[in-house]
Every structure is written in C-alpha cells, then in structure tokens.
C-alpha cells in the first residue's frame, strides 16, 4: 500500500507570493491533517479535513487555508508569504482517530 | 488546552545501554499519547501509542513506553540502544475533549544520540 505522498518536496518562493502544497493520503483514508515544523516553533497543527470538511483548526492566521477534495486529496495554500513561513510542511492521513501516518513533507523556503 | 513537555533537548547513550526519553503532558480530559521518530529530511514515523488499558505499551523497533497517570508522564524506553536509533523523537498528545478529530500537540523533540 502506497504511503502518504506530498508534492512538491521542495519549493522556493519570494515574500508576497502565494503557494499551494498537495497531499495524497493513503488509499481509503478520509482524514488529512497538516502540520508546520520550524526550528523555533517546533511542530504545530494547522488544520484537519475529514470528508471535505474542516474538522479542526490550529492557531494560524487566515493566510493559511486548505481544502479537501472528494477523493480525499488535500491542498493547503499560503498567501502573501512571509519569511517566517519557511518551514517543513507535513501532511498526515488517517483511517480512524488516533492513528496518523505522515508524509515526507514539503520544504518551503521563502526568500 | 493540551500541552506536552520534553525536558531534554538531547540524550546521549552508549550502544547497548538502556535509553529513556522523557515526556510529560497536560490535558483536560483523558489523554491519548504517542511517540514518533524523525530521521533527517524525513517525515514522522509512528512508534507507539497509549489509548487505554495496560500502562506499558510496546511499539516498533523494540521501543516501549510507560504511561503514568499520577505523574502525567509517558516516557519512551528501550532496553538496549542501537546506533541506528539516533534520531529526533517527538512525544504527542490528543485530548479526548478536542472532539472527534486528530489534532495532535507535539513536544519540542529530543535528539537521541547513540554512540559506539
């Protein structure tokens, strides 16, 4: 069974631009969560989608948004990028609560 | 609000010796606790979880963790460390009162270094 895939793996953007990251969950998993990992703030929860609906949301500004499609694939978007948005963005999928499988992440660098 | 503390930024241990990586938590309801490991430039790999039941949980790669409700701790242990265990370890908690979702709160991580 294929694991969680995230595209692209690496991304370089400049301040003010926007970016879209993609996550394909494990087949059959309906929950997708997103996390941001930075050296300073560690791992922080962004949001979770389940059956195309946002189920949980972390404490991030409105520049961070996401969505989930009917095939459970998810995208997250960051608008008006700031230097502090440079991070590893991790996606996790889940078939049931309390069992998440993480993808390799997308490394975003904002210049 | 839920929180997790990993008091040690780094733990050094000799290969073959037992290892312990510490974790304490704070939640409003019953805790669901997890350990993940991260190798350089990789995502998180699940090691083990405590949901309910036996306080000693056994996981992948010979790791185990002990849930202690009175001390609100969930320390990760392994009887005999391997050099290949060297990685970044994260403890995480989900509060049952957060609803039906998968929101995890992570600790700051502990870098484990196993030396020959």
Image (spheres, grey):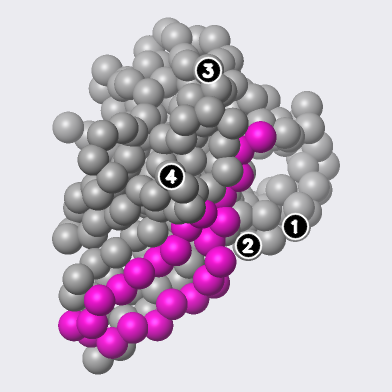
> What residue do we see at 31% from left, 32% from top?
B52
The secondary structure type at the circle numbered 3 is loop
Q: Secondary structure at mark 4?
A: loop
Query: Mark 1, residues whose alpha carbon is within 10 Å: few (<14), some, or many (≥20)?
Result: few
> Label 1 belongs to which residue?
A111
Badge 2 density bin: few <14, some 14–19, many ≥20, Cα 10 Å: few
> Quick check: do tags 4 and 1 share a chain?
no
- Residue B75 appears in the figure: yes
Query: How many angstroms separate mark 3 from mark 2 (CA)?
Result: 29 Å
Most distant residue in the front direction:
B70
In the rendered structure, which segment of residues is drawn in magenta? B1-24
Q: Nearer the viewer, mark 4 or mark 2?
A: 4
The residue tagged 4 is B69
Q: Which residue is mark 3?
A: B99
Residue A70 is left or right of residue A95, and the answer is: right
In the image shown, does A7 or B105 lie closer to the viewer? B105
């Amino acid at each position: 069974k294929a694991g969680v895939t995230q595209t692209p793996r690496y991304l370089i953007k400049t301040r003010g631009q926007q970016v879209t990251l993609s996550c394909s969950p494990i087949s059959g998993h309906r929950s997708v969560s997103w996390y941001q990992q930075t050296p300073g703030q560690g791992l922080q929860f962004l949001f979770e989608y389940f059956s195309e609906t946002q189920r949980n949301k972390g404490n991030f500004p409105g520049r961070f948004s996401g969505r989930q499609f009917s095939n459970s694939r998810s995208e997250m978007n960051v608008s008006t990028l700031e230097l502090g948005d440079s991070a590893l963005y991790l996606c996790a999928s889940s078939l049931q609560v309390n069992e998440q499988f993480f993808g390799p992440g997308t490394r975003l660098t904002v210049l | 609000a839920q929180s997790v503390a990993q008091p040690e930024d780094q733990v050094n241990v000799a290969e073959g010796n037992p290892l312990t990586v510490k974790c304490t938590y704070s939640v409003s309801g019953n805790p669901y606790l997890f350990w993940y490991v991260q190798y350089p430039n990789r995502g998180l790999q699940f090691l083990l979880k405590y949901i309910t039941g036996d306080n000693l949980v056994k996981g992948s790669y010979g790791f185990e963790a002990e849930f202690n409700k009175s001390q609100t701790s969930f320390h990760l242990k392994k009887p005999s460390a391997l050099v290949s265990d060297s990685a970044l370890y994260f403890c995480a908690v989900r509060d049952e009162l957060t609803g039906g979702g998968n929101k995890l709160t992570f600790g700051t991580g502990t870098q484990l270094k196993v030396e020959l």
